[in-house]
């Protein structure tokens, strides 16, 4: 085996490394033994220009910022990552720090948008940061003793230095933000409550739906004759979801199709049942717990504003307290009354949901107050599909009826809406046969 090459002297400059698994010895008849010596046993000339290699693949050292003159150094107290995040928030506001302070002092929400206030909530100084800034500006900071030039502060530190005199900064920003967003939250809750009021009214007064329930009750008692299910005075609404699954002997017509066709003979408006209950779909997705959570947030926000107004009155000598109290009291005068009405409206909503649930003979569950509405919505979805398919089939059937002389359909008196239903025999207990398919 060939002896390993002598170790190369350490380079005078730092070079990039090639990471590999080094072979310490070269066995006979391996590729690594071959180039190590010439035929005469002498070392061959290098294939690589090492000077050029070092020139191209050296590691360039970046001069440390510590070499800058001390007078040009920024004074930083905020963690670098946190400072970067806060600087992004501040840059989105696009206002001078002095203007931001003035708007906060005067509780001037016209100068700051909701997004601005959200950003300021995310850019609040911590106590230790304010303490460091106060010590620096007073020339007492242990690291910068005798220094107090605010121009040397970093961007975020300059912002903190500007707003540090705003009384109860965090609470003030939150009060201003709540005052700007409370109306929108009140409207959202009120909208949800109105939907529930409307759907409860529809569920009690929609004649097509009540007539359909009566038809299903009659049909069910007739089909269940002779069994323990007969003689029902009502039924749980989830039975409506099973009607589309029960097929006639033709294996196409469902019990729901039959009910719709039967009702359509007496009242064609049955096809507009879904339109007669327009709020069911929206009401079925309402989560009462989410609505009550929004009300709880409004309640907490109002308490925060009241508490901060009381504190500001106790410290009336503080700069900006008078304008803050004036602005927040004006807001409380209208928001408190609206919130009281909203709370009463929520109690009414729960009572209405319980009432309409019991109206249909269902059990009201406080944890799932819209369960009955959701069941009706599921049924209306199925109903719409079946009704639409029936109407399409009716249109096709009316076109074909004239081309089949002697058929039973052609022997009927003409009408604006021919019935698509055919029954075999006059006995209502016979199997249902419908000449349409979906």
Image: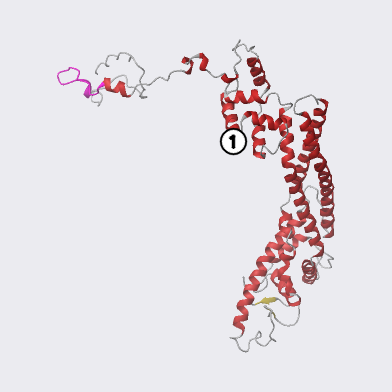
Q: Is residue 360 above or below residue 73?
A: below
Crowd rating for badge 1 (residues with CA inside 10 Å; few <14, some 14–19, many 20+): few
Residue at label 1? 92
Q: Is residue 77 above or below residue 216?
A: above
Direction from residue 100 to residue 59 in the image, left or right: left
Magenta stretch contains residue 37: yes
The region drawn magenta spans 34-49
Q: Position of residue 245 (x, y in %)?
A: 68, 65
- Asked whether residue 186 appears in the rendered view, the answer is yes
Magenta stretch contains residue 396: no
Q: Is residue 47 above or below residue 108?
A: above
Direction from residue 344 to residue 387 in the image, left or right: left
Direction from residue 124 to residue 70 in the image, left or right: left
| Local secondary structure at mark 1 | helix
Q: Main secondary structure of the magenta part?
A: loop
Residue lying furthest left: 40
Q: Position of residue 339 (x, y in %)?
A: 81, 44
Residue 60: name its quadrant. top left
Q: Is residue 349 above or below residue 157?
A: below
Depth check: give the residue in front, 355 or 109.
109
Residue 363: name its quadrant. bottom right
Depth check: give the residue in front, 305 or 248.
305
Depth check: give the residue in front, 1 or 38.
38
Taking the spot 81% from the left edge, 47% from the top edge, the residue there is 342
Quadrant housing the N terminus: top left
Q: Position of residue 144 (x, y in %)?
A: 59, 12
- Asked whether residue 252 appears in the rendered view, the answer is no
Depth check: give the residue in front, 321 or 200.
321
Direction from residue 49 to residue 431 in the image, left or right: right
Taking the spot 77% from the left edge, 53% from the top edge, the residue there is 370
Taking the spot 68% from the left edge, 30% from the top edge, the residue there is 102
């Amino acid at each position: 085996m060939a002896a390993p090459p002598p170790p190369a002297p350490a380079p005078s400059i730092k070079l990039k490394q090639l990471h590999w698994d080094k072979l310490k010895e070269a066995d006979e008849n391996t590729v690594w033994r071959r180039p190590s010596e010439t035929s005469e046993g002498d070392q061959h000339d290098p294939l690589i220009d090492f000077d050029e290699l070092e020139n191209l693949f050296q590691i360039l050292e970046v001069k440390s910022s510590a070499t800058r003159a001390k007078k040009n150094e920024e004074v930083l107290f905020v963690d670098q990552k946190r400072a970067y995040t806060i600087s992004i928030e501040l840059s989105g506001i696009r206002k001078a720090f002095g203007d931001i302070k003035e708007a906060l002092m005067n509780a001037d929400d016209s100068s700051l948008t909701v997004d601005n206030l959200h950003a300021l909530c995310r850019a609040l100084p911590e106590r230790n940061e304010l303490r460091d800034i106060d010590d620096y500006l007073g020339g007492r900071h242990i690291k910068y003793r005798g220094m107090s030039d605010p121009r040397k502060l970093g961007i975020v530190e300059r912002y903190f230095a500007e707003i540090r005199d705003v009384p109860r900064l965090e609470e003030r920003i939150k009060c201003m933000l709540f005052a700007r967003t409370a109306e929108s939250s009140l409207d959202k809750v009120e909208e949800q409550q109105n939907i529930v009021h409307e759907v409860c009214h529809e569920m009690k007064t929609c004649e097509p739906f009540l007539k359909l329930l009566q038809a299903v009750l009659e049909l069910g008692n007739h089909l269940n004759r002779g069994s323990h299910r007969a003689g029902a005075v009502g039924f749980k609404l989830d039975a409506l979801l099973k009607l589309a699954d029960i097929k006639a002997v033709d294996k196409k017509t469902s019990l729901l199709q039959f009910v719709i066709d039967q009702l359509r003979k007496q009242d064609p408006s049955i096809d507009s049942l879904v339109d007669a209950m327009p709020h069911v779909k929206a009401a079925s997705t309402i989560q009462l717990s989410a609505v009550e959570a929004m009300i709880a947030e409004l309640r907490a926000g109002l308490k925060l504003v009241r508490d901060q107004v009381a504190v500001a009155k106790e410290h009336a000598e503080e700069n900006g307290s008078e304008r803050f109290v004036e602005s927040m009291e004006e807001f409380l005068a209208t928001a408190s009354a609206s919130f009281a009405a909203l709370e009463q409206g929520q109690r009414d909503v729960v009572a209405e949901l319980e009432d309409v649930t019991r109206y249909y003979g269902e059990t009201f569950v406080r944890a799932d107050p819209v369960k009955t509405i959701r069941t009706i919505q599921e049924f209306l979805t199925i109903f719409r599909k079946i009704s639409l398919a029936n109407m399409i089939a009716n249109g096709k059937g009316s076109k074909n009826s004239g081309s089949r002389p002697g058929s039973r359909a052609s022997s009927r008196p003409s009408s604006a809406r021919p019935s698509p239903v055919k029954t075999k025999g006059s006995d209502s207990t016979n199997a249902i046969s419908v000449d349409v398919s979906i």
